[in-house]
Image (cartoon, rainbow, N blue to C red):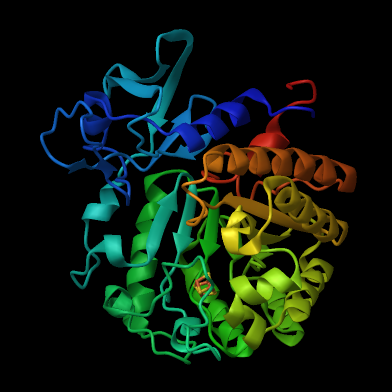
Amino acid sequence: MKSLPESARLKLELMFDGVRYSDALGKAAEHAFPNFYPYRFHEGEENPTGQPKATIPYLMAFDDGTMMRVKGNWKSPWKVVGDRARGYRLHNGDDIGSDLAIEFDPLPKWMQQQTSDGFPMAQAGVSLHGDMAVINIAPGCDYFLEKGANGHSMRCSFCAYGAPNARVSHYQQVSGQPGLPDITYQRMKETLSLALQDRAIGHIYLVAGSLTDWRLEADRFIEVARHVQEVNQHRVPVTCGSGALPKEKLLELHGLGLVDAVCFNLEIWGKDLFERVCPGKQKFVGYENWIQSLEDAVALWGRGRVYSAMVAGIELEPEFEMNWEQAAKRAIEGADALCRKGIIPIYSLYWPTGGQDHPDYLSRLRNYFERLNLEHHAIRQREGLEVWGGFMCHQCAYMQMECDMDRAKAGDA
Ligand code: SF4
């Protein structure tokens, strides 16, 4: 494949361009899953709300199901028109060639309901990304509590979501302990049960913050998986999205038959960068151990059932002093090495926080991401590896393009 297939090309365009505000976009937020980032109006931009910011939907999909995040951008040529009854469409300026039917991911009814003990289901540790249910009932990451020699916390440099603070205290997670109170499991199970009845769910993905002892981290995930399977009556595929786990715990997890795939996020290829981007993972597990654990998992779950999420684009942070070609070359080397071992890396687009003033900021990142996806697809084809539909698909992967590439038929591009 020399260029991106059509749906992937449009998705990439929208990931970068975003959409500008319109009445239709604002109205859609009344029934769509709300975006964590509100739309912020630019000075001088036409603003029908009279407010500095407005709620907008989180996810939208083309009519072939291709899912992507809604990014607000006042300079975007893309604009949402239509309404819920007639359907929504995306227009690109005056170009009538770009008139696309879209749908917004809905706000599920259960998100406004309560568990039997009167707790809001929206906070029970179940969330949806399209047709994927993500279970996270222990979001606090103990790496945030550990200090490196420089006095900084050992969290991953890009991570803003793992802080064990008041925001996540309702899970009653205790630092250093894998287990959670019964009430936390109970609320999650009631909520997941309803979510599974409410719409077709194709994948269940388990995540949590890390523990400094990887054996205890395995115990946490085994326990969470056990509880999930109690309500997973139709046996929707489950992925363990923990950190890397030691071999004896992998054997235990596999032997219990609780999960169908695993995803241990290496985040970045190359020990030199791993140490800087993921100091906690390096100190408490180590780069070589991480890769060994992924290899051990392939021996158990098989090729194509073992994944590793990567923060695609973090190499372009100015401190790493790489141009986009060097960054892409390194990432592609990593994709090649991992795929040869039967491990599929999944590249989630990361927006570097530094270098935004650079005039080519967006085009460098876009070139990097496009080249990486094309090469990664070619590598997967060579290795006979496709993203397994039980792990994720084009209807949930909103910041990744592997599934869009895999589903394109030969000759699409
Ligand atoms: S392991 Fe890293 S990415 Fe995961 S929650 Fe902890 S700090 Fe964040």
Tag count in the figure?
A: 0
Please, is residue 362 above or below residue 201 in the view? above
Residue at 40% of width from left, 38% of height from top?
70
Q: In which quarter of the image is the N terminus?
A: top right
Q: Residue 98's x, y, as percent?
A: 48, 14
Determine the image quadrant of residue 54. Answer: top left
What residue is rendered at 84% in x and 45% in y?
379
Residue 266 percent coordinates (x, y)? 67, 68
Image position of 21 (left or right of 198): left
Residue 281 shows up from this direction = yes
Q: Which of 256 and 59 is in front in this view?
A: 59
Between 342 and 369, the one nearer to me in the picture? 369
Residue 366 lies, in percent from the top left, at: 60, 39
Quarter of the image that includes the C terminus: top right
From what the image shows, is residue 337 above or below residue 33?
below
Residue 401 visible in the snapshot: no
Q: In this view, does 303 lie to the left or right of 206?
A: right
Closer-to-camera residue (65/326):
326
On the image, the x and y values in percent for residue 260 come to 67, 62
Relative side of 186 to 95, left or right? left
Tell me what residue is drawn at x 22 percent, y 64 percent.
120
Q: Residue at the left extreme? A: 50
